[in-house]
Amino acid sequence: MKILDIGKTNYEDALKLQKSLFDQKVKDPCSEDIILITEHYPVYTLGKTSKEEHIINIPENIPVYKIERGGSITFHGEGQIVVYPVVHLKGKKRSVRNFIWTLEEIMIRTVQEFGINGFRLDRYRGVFTPKGKIGFVGIKVSRHISYHGISLNISVDKNFFRKILPCGIKDIPVCNMSDFVGDVDLENVKQILIKNIKQLL
């Protein structure tokens, strides 16, 4: 498994890179799994279950992409770590359900190292805390290969989330790690996240 930290990216550039890696993986399923780690400039993405009522008032200057991942609408921006695993699930004898559970577990263990109680809810995907949703999951699996992935809120501007119903959820707010621990270093969180990726994926 190879982990590539590609820094801050425009969403479109990261999407093109994912698809290129996916195509390579299709041609050679035994090739090394790739984990992309990035931080996006502001962008909204609409998954397969997005509905018009999930969009409240998206600013005109922020790009919106309709993509093939699972889930509804979400926001990506600075202060949020995004992880895109291009992984062959069959090679690891892993079901899609188990893979999603593992992605959630990576985020749960990461926030727990900062004393934050992260947990799952039966009716939703992602990671939740007493103050709201902190981790998001939206993947696509084709030919046993995953792409798209997860995002973890560190200190992202939550005003962007107020322009939508994140993941189509009305009754649970969005939160940051910084809501619990004050100033938190994104690079420090990233290293802990990478450690958990290596242990669990």
Image (spheres, rainbow, N blue to C red):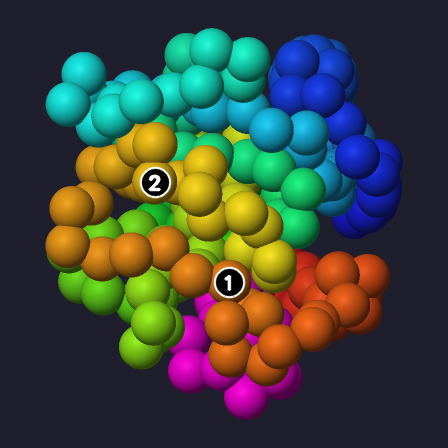
In the image, 159 versus 141, the foreground residue is 159
As measured in the structure, the alpha-carbon distance from the residue carrying label 2 to the one carrying label 1 is 14 Å
Q: Nearer the viewer, mark 2 or mark 1?
A: 2
Tell me the residue at 25%/25% (across/down).
56
Q: Is residue 98 visible?
A: no
Q: Which mark is residue 82?
A: none
Dot 2 alpha-carbon crowd within 10 angstroms: few under 14, some 14 to 19, many 20 or more: some
Relative to 158, residue 106 above or below? below
Q: Quadrant of residue 167?
A: top left
Tell me the residue at 47%/24% (across/down).
44
Tell me the residue at 30%/32% (across/down).
164
In the image, 28 versus 12, the foreground residue is 12
Query: Would you name the residue on which mark 1 appears?
Result: 176
Q: Which mark is residue 162?
A: 2
Q: Quadrant of residue 4?
A: top right
Q: Secondary structure at mark 1?
A: loop
Percent coordinates x, y for residue 134 in the rendering: 44, 60
Q: Is residue 37 left or right of residue 175?
A: right
Percent coordinates x, y for residue 99 in the rendering: 45, 51
Q: Is residue 42 magenta?
A: no
Q: Main secondary structure of the magenta part?
A: helix
Q: Quadrant of residue 133?
A: bottom left
Q: Secondary structure at mark 2?
A: helix
Percent coordinates x, y for residue 108 in the rendering: 49, 71
> Start and end of the magenta stretch?
104-118
Q: Which comes sooner in the sequence, label 2 or label 1?
A: 2
Three-letter amino acid code at disc 2?
Answer: Arg
